[in-house]
Amino acid sequence: MNDEHKRRRIDPDEREQEIMQAALVLAELNGYRVITREQIAEYAKCSPSLVGKYFGDMQELRRCIMRAAVKQERAEVVLQGLVTRDPIALSAPEHVRTAAKNRLDDPHFTAIDDQ
């Protein structure tokens, strides 16, 4: 195998973070309730089974996405959680919930359903 085809082994913690960042981007673009393991895997350039290895079933994956969105203060994803009454979003710190709600007043904000 030549050097072009060799893959660099990625640290598992780093890979998990890459997958979660891919999931957050897709959640912002498409909605965290509708993205699939396959879409995340394609965006993160890994297999769907690797996504499952790190994050479990889709219900657990969605919980992980919302926890990460709250921790990283990703307002558009948290707003989706507030609208769908996600318990993690509803229990987010007040400043995170407020920032998410303020996205509704942003003239550049487009609801997922309007895209």
Image (spheres, helix red, strand yellow):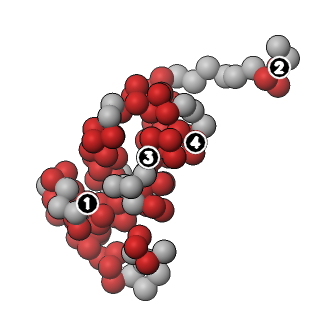
Task: Classify mark 2: helix, strand or loop.
Answer: helix
Give the Cα distance between marks 4 and 2. Answer: 23 Å
Residue 43 image point, x, y percent? 57, 45
Q: Amino acid at mark 4?
A: Glu
Query: Reading the chain from its start, which is encountered first: label 3 or label 1?
Result: 3
Q: Earlier in the sequence, mark 4 or mark 2?
A: 2
Q: Nearer the viewer, mark 2 or mark 3?
A: 3
* Left or right, residue 53 beside residue 64: right
Q: Looking at the image, is mark 4 or mark 3 earlier in the sequence?
A: 3
Q: Which residue is mark 3?
A: 36
Q: Which residue is mark 2?
A: 3
Q: Residue at x 40, y 30 (%)?
A: 52
In this view, the residue in front, 76 or 71, is 76
Q: CA distance from mark 2 to mark 3?
A: 33 Å
Read off the residue under disc 4: 42
Q: Earlier in the sequence, mark 1 or mark 4?
A: 4
Task: Give the vertical position of 25 relative to 43 (above or below).
Answer: below
Q: Which residue is mark 1?
A: 81
Q: How many circles with numbers are drawn on the protein?
A: 4
Q: Mark 2–mark 1 contact, CB under 8 Å?
A: no
> Secondary structure under badge 3?
loop
Q: Amino acid at mark 1?
A: Gly
Circles 4, 2 touching at the beta carbon (< 8 Å): no
Query: Can residue 66 be seen from the camera position used here?
Result: yes
